[in-house]
Image: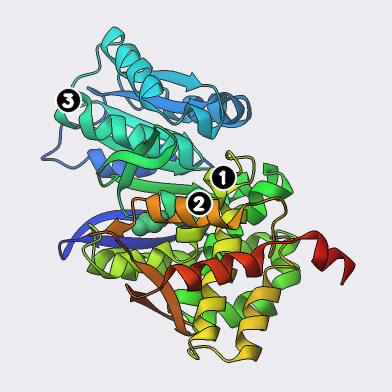
Amino acid sequence: MSERLPIMYNKKPCYDIVFTQSFRELAGELQGLYGGPEQQGLESRKICIVTDSTVDGLYGGQVQEQLEGICRKVVKYAFPSGEEHKNLDTVKDIYTFLIRENLDRKDLLLALGGGVVGDTTGYVAATYLRGIDFIQVPTTLLAQTDSSIGGKTGVDFDGYKNMVGAFKMPRLVYMNLDTLRTLDDRQFFSGFAEVMKHGLIRDGILYQWLIENMYEICDRDPDVLQEMLLRSCTVKKNVVEKDPTEQGERALLNFGHTIGHAVEKYKNFQLCHGECVALGAVAAAYISWKRDMLSMEEYYEVRDMFVPFRLPISVEDIDPQEILRLTKSDKKMASGQITFVLLKKIGKAVLDRTVTDQEILDAINEIHFSDEDAHA
Ligand code: GLY
């Protein structure tokens, strides 16, 4: 059964997240959004589906079919899959396509895909003609639990992730959870790292629930995944509603990302984002333990809970000093000081600006799998 979670922005209703098991309700949702008496309706609008080559092959046709007939024209733009295409060249190519297809300010974009598609399309929507409406239709667990919610859009620049971007709220986030079936294991569990993050930072009950439902989650039981996403998105909702533009509390969502992004960059994006978040989360939990915020038992539990979800807790072939340097060059620095997210307890994260280079280095060494570990 479909469920819905409304998201507020500046204390006003802004958009809904719809959790469904197919694309069949998408047309009705859009008609509901644009069909009110004071609105112009969809008949006069064009919709441009923006997707990538992989998702296009899987769902592009189905989604296009759902939308044909409810609006003036449906067009589709697919760019090659992969993080390396999340850049300003792709943005420029999409602008060119939209101009060629004569999309104007009342037309809409529909982002069909994972985080790369959602973030890039959102940035185009924020800037094309100074802003047009966009709909998020996330098809990966990472996008469904995290990147499609909260209005962060943008692209990578010069090797830095999400360096150029804008806050732009979607008009609707439509999730067909059946799309999770076609994800390969690595992509699925990479997204799961962000779900685990939500439990760790804000919801100890969600964290316990994830452990109790481990087998069903790994088997991708549809009802369990829907409940998991509803719970996980509720954590994200509560954080972004209070601090939509990351003036403070929203930075808690960066738990695991400070060292995680550095590893991701060091490994030249060969590891999945969620794998790096898991490594970064272990490192942050380690610092929390060393500061007596978590007990030793809690630290080892947090660390080991990533393993059954096929996420790494250590990484080979890294240079800890270089990871430290990359950590410090990440954009999460403010006035030369890194804002770290630590765990006060499971289910409660705090921001901390006092973490020293030595603490970071010790944490990087903790997640560094070296030959000595192998022979121990
Ligand atoms: N993915 C982190 C945030 O939305 O703030």
Residue type at the position of mark 2: Ala
Work out whether residue 270 can be spotted. Answer: yes
CB-based contact (under 8 Å), mark 1 and mark 2: yes
| Element assignment for label 2 | helix
Say whether residue 346 is visible.
no
Marks 2 and 3 sit apart, C-alpha to C-alpha, by 38 Å
Q: Residue 105 carries which label?
A: 3
Location of residue 152 with respect to 72 vertically, above or below: below
* Cα separation between marks 1 and 2: 6 Å
Residue lying at the far right of the rendered structure = 375
15 or 100, nearer to the observer: 100
- What distance separates the C-alpha of mark 1 from that of mark 3? 40 Å
The three-letter code of the residue at mark 1 reads: Tyr
Residue at 54% in and 84% down: 290
- Within the displayed image, which quadrant is ligand 1 positioned in? bottom left
Quick one: label 1, few (<14), some, or many (20+) residues within 10 Å? some
Q: Which one is in front in this view, the residue at disc 1 or the one at disc 3?
A: 1
Disc 2 designates what residue?
A: 262
Mark 1 or mark 3, earlier in chain: 3
Q: Position of residue 133 (x, y in %)?
A: 24, 35
Which of the labelled discs sits on residue 350, or is there none? none
Left or right: residue 44 compared with residue 50:
left
Q: Mark 1 points at which residue?
A: 266
Q: Judge: label 1 CB < 8 Å from ligand 1.
A: no
Q: Which quadrant of the structure image shows residue 40?
A: top left
Residue drawn at x 49%, y 71% is 358
The amino acid type, in three-letter code, at marker 3 is: Arg
Secondary structure category for the residue under label 3: loop
Q: Nearer the viewer, residue 239 or 223?
A: 239
Quadrant occupied by the C terminus: bottom right
Q: Nearer the viewer, residue 101 or 46?
A: 101
